Amino acid sequence: MKHTIALIVENKPGVLVRIAALFSRRGFNIDSLTVGATDKPDRARMTISVDGDEVVLEQVTKQLNKLINVIRVSELDPAESVERELAIIKVAAKKEDRSEIMQIVSVFRAKIIDVSPRSMIVEVTGSEDKVEAMVRLLRQFGIKEMARTGKVSMVRGSRIVGP
Amino acid sequence: MGKMSGAEAILECLKLEGVEIIFGLPGGVLLPLYDAIYDSDIRHILVRHEQAAAHAADGYARATGRVGVCIATSGPGATNLVTGIATAYMDSVPLVAMTGQVPTNLIGKDAFQEADITGITMPVTKHSYLVRDAKEIPRVFREAFYIARTGRPGPVLIDLPRDVTVNELDFKYPEIDLPGYSPNLKVHGLQIKRAAQALMEAERPVIYVGGGVKYSDGHRELVTLAEKIKAPVTTTLMGIGCFPEDHPLSLGMLGMHGTKYANYAVQESDLILAVGARFDDRVTGKIASFAPQAKIIHVDVDPAEIGKNVRVDIPVVGDAKSALAELAKVVEDKPWSPWNDKVAGWKSDHPLGYARDGDSIKPQAVLETICELCPDAVIVTEVGQNQMWAAQFFTHKDPKHFISSGGLGTMGYGFPAAIGAKLGCPDKEVFDIAGDGSFQMNIQELATAVVNEVPVKVIILNNGVLGMVRQWQDLFYEKRFSSTTLHRVPDFVKVAEAYGALGLRATKPSEIEPVLKEAIDSEVVTVVDIIISPDEKVSPMVPAGASLSEILELERAEGSGQFQKSYAGSAASEILELEG
């Protein structure tokens, strides 16, 4: 089972290493990990997607809380959160395929951000499922390259996981 | 306080933290710091190998309850500390380890004697710092000491590039500001209430105590609670001494080499109150069959320990001392029960023992004699058979008087740790209970002890083999003694004399007492070489991976030739029959 954890950490060198090392030493699996700035310059926010049962999740949360540089650990319930991932995909685009690719892009409310004679770069934003679906559909044309950010997530409503 | 160099600031911080003694060995990048140490009031003990600096600081910390401090130079000096840091980490010992580092402009360039020591020690430190600016020194040291000694204690490493110790700063000791660290010491009232109720309802309770009680200084509260509810108390290796072993409710140690009655009591109990212990595999045996009928209350200052290895019914996060005090307040007196009678029966039917016959010296008898002659001694151990005999055959009564590498099981720990303990408690008699294998791993520290006049007494139970591994080869590998024979080299009496220590030897049982008396009367570093049989075993024993119910009396089982069979079969009934 997949869980999403939001972390507020001190924005210092070595913090990411501590977190990655903890996952590797304790044998936890990271599905994806994103790091970015927050509104406060000395704090960063991470979103980690972990695979495991409730016992694993509890240990992950507790062990992360023990790291001195980790200020806050919150599990984000997917039912009460919005989550987004961004992917840019370089897809082979022969002349005869272009219109179909553009149709798919339009249905997914994605964007074409680069065009060249043999390929296009598509930008898609959405939930992991939506990105997955888009990738599946583009595969038939030939995906030459893909970069995904991993997801970021936030609880709906007034609950704050702030720095 | 005005301007000072980084090195001077470091010593100022140590002074403000109340540090009186540090253990270390200098090197190139540490020259500025050692130059400042030359003028300082802080006592520096020069070791002969950096590993010993970490162990000595650790032994000092365990014996005194204060933060131990060690120091080593960059590169190999720093990596030599790693075993000592890992030892302290596994046993939750408060330690601040300082390492020299190449100048900041050379970091990452593979400079001479450069090692990424913060990276190397990340999994074995509670926290670590690479100081990049002299201005950070006061804050870093203040935080390091605070983190090392609070909550669940542990080692903190501070890596100090050479230029940082030279550059000047305006010294101001700041307040602690650690938004990501708040050790949860206060226990939750509702959880205490639930735990107390469970204790009152339990018919067959057992209190299982670990090192957390030692570090929180909660042994008096433990006795009060146990006496009030008449609960038998068993300790882990780390918890030894937290409950007086001559107390009628004491079960001694549990686990792989624990007493039979402790293991039987745990397996039969309907409620385990675990305090400051972490359900280590050497304690629980096969985890699925550990205390099968028991509800579990788990008190620990580290929330991550609760639910890590076993399912817990009533978690209590907080300091062991205050949890025990709160519990003792709310529970009511309980009478001596049929459970107490049953446990007492096991105790008298299955005492710890050994065959007292024969011409060779019994290591168990050595420990018993030390206990008679010097019941208040601080017992530091190496690792292996010597450690288990020291745990089993000395009657421990004081939590700070038994010092041993439990979690990491570091051979070579005992002697330097004994030096640290003796420096922390100069008025107490300090023994290092050693094996010939372990002692040789830090034998060079004889020089440290002799030069600094630290009169520890090393008792070598010399069987000429790596005894604990050999015991397993004997039992489970058809006596194929692969690489466990040490050939009784060197002559430890001559080695002691070469270092300027007193060397003594005992080869016959009748010599034990006079030799030990001579060692105790000696005012100098003393090494006692006691010749024992390589076939002497640590008993009883729960084979690895077996349940605690399957604890075996080795001498007897081996003699009857049924040991192999019963181990392979692993059926409890078969073993009980064997014990007949």
Image (tube, rainbow, N blue to C red):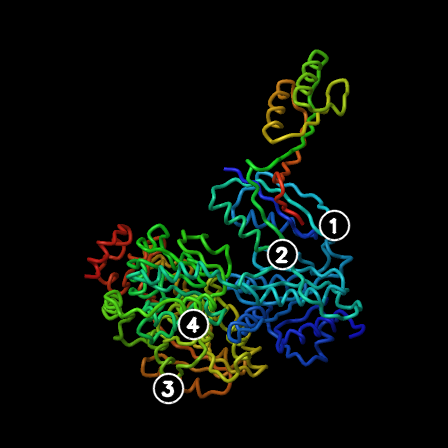
Q: Which dot marks residue B180?
A: 2
Q: Which amino acid does label 1 sit on?
A: Pro
Does mark 2 fall on the same chain as mark 1?
no
Q: Which chain carries label 1?
A: A
Which amino acid type is shown beneath numbered disc 3?
Pro
**Which quarter of the figure is the C terminus of chain B placed in?**
bottom left
Dot 3 crowding, Cα within 10 Å, few <14, some 14–19, many 20+: few
Three-letter amino acid code at disc 2?
Gly
Indicate left or right for A155 with B512 as reference: right
Q: Is mark 1 on a helix, strand or loop?
A: loop
Q: In this view, does A129 lie to the left or right of B232?
A: right
Residue for badge 3: B514
Report the front residue among B386 and A113.
Answer: A113
| Distance CA(mark 4)–CA(mark 1) | 47 Å
In the displayed orientation, state which residue is furthest to the top.
Answer: A96
Task: Please name the amino acid that badge 4 sits on.
Answer: Glu
B180, above or below B354, in the image: above
The x, y position of residue B375, in whole percent, is 39, 81
Q: Which chain carries label 4?
A: B
The answer to whether the residues at label 1 and label 3 have Cβ atoms under 8 Å apart is: no
* 3 or 4: tag closer to the N-terminus: 4
Residue tagged 4: B221
Does residue B283 sit above or below B390 in this rendering? above
- Residue B296's place in the image compared with B509, above or below, is above
Residue wearing tag 1? A41
Looking at the image, is mark 1 or mark 3 nearer the viewer?
A: 1
Q: How many labels does the image show?
A: 4
